[in-house]
Amino acid sequence: MKQTKNLILLYIVVILVVAYKTSAMTEDDKEFLEAHNKARAQAGLPPFTYDQTLADFANKHALSHARDCALTHSDGSYGENLFWGSASKSLKWRPKDAVYAWVKEQKYYNRKANTCMPGQKCGHYTQIMWRDTKKIGCARSNCNGKSSYMVCEYDPPGNFEGLSPFDKHDPFIYTQS
């Protein structure tokens, strides 16, 4: 009887912790995650989970560019996508706008050849599509008090030279830094 009560109590605690973690996500967090997972689902890839450690890292990086708005990568151990939205629309830029801008690079990516059209960028798209990536964390900040700056971190990172984002890769590649 006591074991049953302890087991029930344990289940209640787990449910409360999961509910807290889920409700602790902000609307921005949910929007970043939903936009990423929508794009991945359309490509037949598994969804990401949201990670607060990655979000904290992204927030620190976003805040470090609150004055200069520079699209400069953090050079951290995660994959990373950056977005800057002009001041003319600053109050209207949403997390999904950044993700959609990155996903639009798909039109320049040749999946069969695993190449990007010359003169175009595809790295944001391929990072989102990197099959081995399991979790993300993102942040949005104001830049110069007017424009929007957004950062998403990806773990494990993607975009290894010569490898397709749609294939599963040997986990060994992630230990070689």
Image (cartoon, helix red, strand yellow):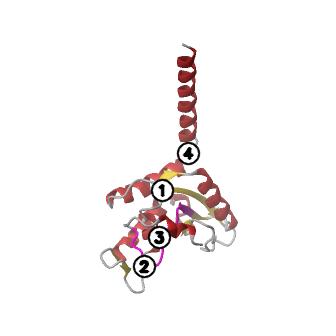
Query: Magenta span covers which residues?
Result: 151-165
| Cα distance between the residues tagged 3 and 2 | 16 Å
The label shown at residue 121 is none
The label shown at residue 25 is 4
Question: Which residue does the numbered mark 3 point to in the structure image?
Answer: 124
| Cα distance between the residues tagged 3 and 4 | 24 Å
> Can you give x and y, in whole percent of width and height, for residue 50 in the image?
52, 51
| Cα distance between the residues tagged 3 and 1 | 16 Å
Question: Which residue does the numbered mark 1 point to in the structure image?
Answer: 134
In the image, is residue 139 above or below residue 76? above
Q: Residues within 10 Å of mark 3 (few under 14, many from 20)?
A: many
* Residue in the picture at 54% in, 23% down: 7
| Amino acid on which disc 4 is placed | Met
Q: Residues within 10 Å of mark 2 (few under 14, many from 20)?
A: few
The answer to which of 163 and 90 lies nearer the viewer is 163
| Amino acid on which disc 3 is placed | His
Question: Upstream in the sequence, badge 4 or badge 1?
Answer: 4
State which mark lies toward you, 4 or 1.
Answer: 1
- Element under disc 2: loop
| Cα distance between the residues tagged 1 and 2 | 20 Å
State which mark lies toward you, 3 or 1.
Answer: 1
| Cα distance between the residues tagged 2 and 4 | 35 Å
Q: Is residue 29 magenta?
A: no
Question: Which residue does the numbered mark 2 point to in the structure image?
Answer: 162
Magenta stretch: dominant SS? loop
